[in-house]
Amino acid sequence: MSWTREQRNVTIAAYLGWTLDAFDFFLMVFILKDIAAEFNTGIPEVAFAITLTLAMRPVGALIFGRLADKFGRRPTLMINIACYSLLELLSGFSPNLATLIVLRALFGIAMGGEWGVGSALTMETVPTKSRGFVSGLLQAGYPSGYLLASIVFGVLYQYIGWRGMFFVGVVPALLVLYVRSNVPESPAWVAMEKKPRPSLLATLKRNWVLSIYAIILMTAFNFFSHGTQDLYPTFLREQHHFDPHTVSLITITLNIGAIVGGLLFGSISEKIGRRRAICIAALIALPVLPLWAFSTTSVMLAIGAFLMQISVQGAWGVIPVHLNEISPDEIRATFPGLVYQLGNLLASVNATLQASFAVANNNNYALAMAVVAGTVAVVIAVLILFSRERRGIDMTQSAEQIVATTR
């Protein structure tokens, strides 16, 4: 199926928006140890900043999602990207841990807005038959950001230190210029612009079962991703005592696996359905678990990390399209991002819990990560079977029908 130039530009912008958002988030996971040393505190205390970042993301999903539903996806996306870039820059100037934690909480608000707005804009714009692949591509933005952060850590950290890592994070602001020049508004939003629509609360109330289910599902998904990613560099540095170069190479490898998984299962979901693709991807984690967590050499850990992220981001690769397809049309920029980020809120305790568990058990990060990953893989495989399947729904036509029924 042929694509228009506008459809390509929208996809590129949304992919880069999420990639650079994740890049700014993951820069911090490599430097927990260094921040703790400078501010004379423990790693769990610094990891609390990650917890707050994740906890504040629902606020951003709600604020930016409502702005995008009311004023359009395109202008909201530009404002959002500018906000998270500025807050990343300011993090590098933190004089103490308290200031850093406040800035990371504000960064969480900005980070929480991008995914819902970007995914709605893209899914409402691209050809219907391409949604599965594009979903995998969008979600691959997350490990792409982690991959970029891995490269920056491996190449630049020794020269710029932990504060310099945050300074590099202002680069995404340049994406605003691309969006302004090349990205059109969503046709589905244009179809509903200036037409009367039910309020957010009324729509959520009418879809309360779907809303609660989606939040529970996304809680499990966020434990799956953050439970296998956020403390992995710390696990490699603290438990295995690898140098920064080795840590960088392993995390680059795992993120290549994540990108492969997202693209593969996103595309597969177009043929076998969203639910079945997610179920299969999640269950791959179980046989990979021992290799990923309990290997003793850097090569075997890298192979395990590669395979684990094929599973984790393979399941995640279907989520952008699946949540957008099952979302109520009236609040498509708000609903997917909000349930995703509320799941993040409930799972935001993960980094602090895993770090505290590891420290209490003689720095056994492997066990802490394995317990979380194995449990949620099974939970996701079961939960997704209860979801609706709306593969291929025409979002513009559906939006027009909503408008017709509310006149």
Image: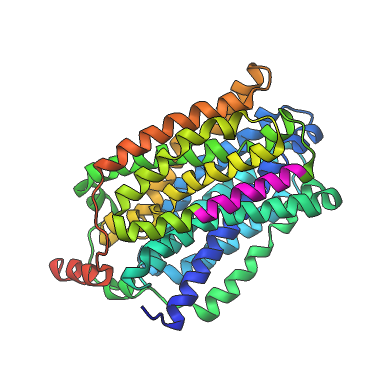
Instruction: Give the residue drawn at x 65%, y 42%.
Output: 302
- In the displayed structure, would residue 184 be above or below residue 394? below
Query: What is the quadrant of the C terminus in the image?
Result: bottom left
Relative to 288, is 353 above or below?
A: above
Residue 136 placed where, x, y %?
Answer: 45, 58
Q: Is residue 146 at all visible to an observer of this figure?
A: yes
Q: Nearer the viewer, residue 74 or 260?
A: 260
Q: Residue at x 46, y 47 (%)?
A: 59
Q: Which residues are magenta?
A: 246-260
Q: Main secondary structure of the magenta part?
A: helix
Q: Is residue 247 magenta?
A: yes
Instruction: Count how many numbered circles sit on residues in the image.
Output: 0
Going by the picture, which residue comes out furthest to the top? 361
At x 73%, y 58%, the residue is: 168
Relative to 305, residue 189 above or below: below
Q: Quadrant of the N terminus?
A: bottom left
Residue 12: horizontal and vertical position, in percent?
A: 52, 71
Please state which of residues 240 and 69 is positioned toward the viewer in this rendering.
240
Q: How far across and down, in percent of the image, does residue 250 sit?
A: 68, 44
User: Measured from the top left, where is residue 307 in percent x and y?
Assistant: 54, 44
Q: Is residue 348 visible?
A: no
